Image (tube, rainbow, N blue to C red):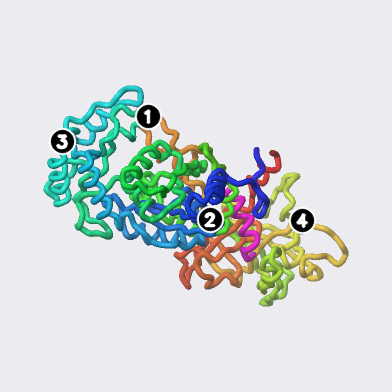
Amino acid sequence: MNKTPEPGENRSLNFIETIIEEDLKNNTYGGRVHTRFPPEPNGYLHIGHAKSICLNFGLAEKYRGLCNLRFDDTNPEAEDVEYVDSIKEDVQWLGFQWHKELYASDYFEQLYDWAEMFIREGKAYVDDQPADVISQQRKSPTEPGVESPFRDRSIEENLDLFRRMRKGEFAEGEKVLRAKIDMRSPNMHMRDPIMYRILHKEHHRTGNQWCLYPMYDWAHGQSDFLEGITHSICTLEFEVHRPLYDWFLDQITTDTYRPKQREMARLNLNYTIMSKRKLLKLVKEGYVKGWDDPRMPTISGFRRRGYTPESIRTFSERIGVAKRENVIDTAFLEHCLREDLNKRARRVMGVINPVKITITNFPEGQTEWLDAVNNPEDPEAGTRKVPFSGTLYIEQDDFMEEPHNKFYRLSPGREVRLRYAYFITCREVLKDDQGNITEILCTYDPETRGGDSPDGRKVKATLHWVSAEHALKTEVRLYDRLFRNENPDDVSEGEDFTVHLNTDSLQIKEAFTEPSVQGAKPLTHYQFERLGYFNVDPDSTPEKMVFNRTVTLKDDWAKIASKS
């Protein structure tokens, strides 16, 4: 396994940076670097988009260039202002600001004018055939396609029909405008691609002004050209589109300037799906509780779960930019998150599966306030006061009535340390009629305040706890992977990807935390000592705090990397 570079380490240029530096050296674009992030507003952005955001905006920052946020809003059937707003929020949350906020719909009139120019030059024609027939006529890469019977319509007839298409005189699917290129080309995208289709749908920006909408391939390169984009970065599936991208540009300008499309491998994570269509299915059919459900791979889902923008940017930088598809282990993303949260998350104590401890020799009604470190990685974070009393909660897993040889935590007759507090010894176990433990009676050594014994005796375990009298009752949501299969798209014939859903991906627990977290703002990060990283969910109210487990403390990636 290759070693993943740490932040700040010297690394070689990725292939896109190499291209940019060569262009700068040759003054290809007059010393300019201008990128764009062009999402379609038909859903919420996911972690794969985060990689593209970090790359496009990061390149602009590195080379003192510009990056536009351009919405590819050419399909009113699926697009909505809600998605536009969420995309802008996600980009800014990741720490970036666009040069201009633009839309493909800004260019609808210009694109239409160019389409008429194509018709007048004999490079486009109106086809009356339905989409399935057009698809069949394209054949396969190893056999020539069949030309449309409408391919040789006169320029006058094509112009008349195209203008009537714009006026709304035809039904959806009744006619399309196709570029006249080469039905024998081995590249299927060059076999008279569709430039426009009819959609009688209201657009989120232009309303009902248009019923004629450009296809992605017709809008993409021309939008890049109009904006002065220098490096148009796409994912690998668009590599076969590049000849069409270039052909369209060649027809609209004789200028020496041309944006260049470059392709990189998309981000693939195991146990994760990236298809917007499938993510929408999860939302609409109630498998998750919205686009920002913390189990979703959306940026808003990661944000709500407690991920930091810094961790996602670090992750995107470290995985690099590749020309070949590969699958990244989710454990590495979690590793980047732990590194960041370890530095910034305040430590607190919380108990998720409580069992009651009564310290029989602790002064009745007394409360002590103990000093606790907020973050050992950050001396400036200071300390806080934690209440300690004679009745506590500890985790059920931290007690075993009949311990095995490798169990070192609390058990009858054994002494352990309470974090920041005292040594305690288990003296008796109380149970109900069903044999369930209801209370553990202990004694404490008042000479061990702070967790050290003056006589030098040692204990083998330190437990976290909360004072029962002062504990804040909270709701804790424990999240696991949404899918049980490493590749959720791997299904048998007739099956749907939802067969791989993990039915235990969410557990809701009633827990107890120290009172210092009361009133914390949504998305505040904490490390619940010995349990994991948590953050405050927006569902929290003054009456009830809700915490999401962001990630456990166990770092599987660190173990994997240490063996490489």
Mark positioned earlier in the residue sequence (2 or 3): 2
**Viewer-nearest residue: 93 or 507:** 93
From which residue to which does the magenta span run?
333-347
Q: Which mark is residue 493?
A: 1
Furthest toward the bottom, the residue is 366
- Position of residue 469 relative to residue 7, above or below, is below
- Can residue 492 be seen at all in this image of the molecule? yes
Seen at 22% across and 28% down, the residue is 147
Residue density around tag 3, few if under 14, some if 14–19, many if 20 or more, within 10 Å: some
Q: What residue sits right under mark 4 in the picture?
A: 414
**Amino acid of disc 4:** Arg
Q: Check the picture and name the quadrant holding the N terminus.
A: top right
Q: Is residue 159 left or right of residue 487?
A: left
Q: What residue is pinned by disc 3?
A: 153
Q: CA distance from mark 2 to mark 3?
A: 48 Å
Mark 1 or mark 4: name the one nearer the start of the chain. Answer: 4
Label 2: which secondary element: helix
